[in-house]
Image (cartoon, rainbow, N blue to C red):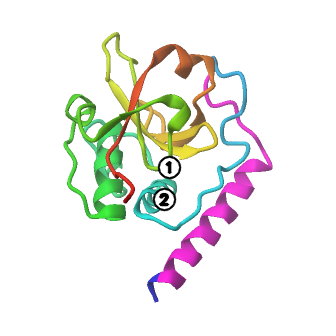
Amino acid sequence: MRKHNLLFLIGFIALILSGCASKPVRLLETETEPAAATAPVIHANDRASSIALQALAHLGTPYRVGGLSPQTGFDCSGLVAYVYREGAGLALPRNTFDLAVLGQAVERAALRPGDLVFYNTQRREYSHVGIYLGEDRFIHAPASGGEVRVESLRADYWMRRYNGARRVIVPPG
């Protein structure tokens, strides 16, 4: 039964994202490519991938300072905490500074779906966090007036503000 639910969720998300792909929207004025134009391919074969899928289920949820749920909206760390709790059963800290010391540091070239990516968006390191999806894309709750969305790690805005990444879910072996 659980496998059928996961397959349904994957199909539903693919349907939603294909609708977005037909009309690319410029997500940031500084962005050089439409990040949501193509959805990353995510293989639902482990907990880390289920985190990425759980995050994608919240595309379009409004940003809200201190927000912790789809009903109230999310801020960046609220989205991460909710997705990890629902997707992997893990309770994570509620602020970016505490998240930035969890798990293992990961080089940008070695990122995997479910890894946390950190940015300096408020003139201080680790002031913003998102969840890596694969194919140089991440999902996050951006700022007041925004909504949960997918963006490209390669966009100039994010490249200049990148602080690093952490792997909270460590694969077996």
Q: Would residue 44 be found to the left or right of residue 30 on screen? A: left
Residue at 65 percent of width and 50 percent of height: 40
What segment is highlighted magenta in the picture? 3-28
Name the residue carrying label 2.
49
Q: Nearer the viewer, residue 128 or 117?
A: 117
CB within 8 Å, label 1 to label 2: yes
Q: Residue 152: horizontal and vertical position, in percent?
A: 61, 33
- In this rendering, the answer to whether 143 lies above or below 36 is above
SS at mark 2?
A: helix
The residue most toward the front is 173
Dot 2 crowding, Cα within 10 Å, few <14, some 14–19, many 20+: many
Name the residue carrying label 1.
113
- In this rendering, the answer to whether 98 lies above or below 112 is above
SS at mark 1?
A: loop
Q: Would residue 123 be found to the left or right of residue 56 on screen? A: left
Mark-to-mark CA distance, 1 and 2: 6 Å
- In this rendering, the answer to whether 4 lies above or below 30 is below
Is 76 covered by the magenta stretch?
no
Q: Specify the amino acid type for callout 1.
A: Pro
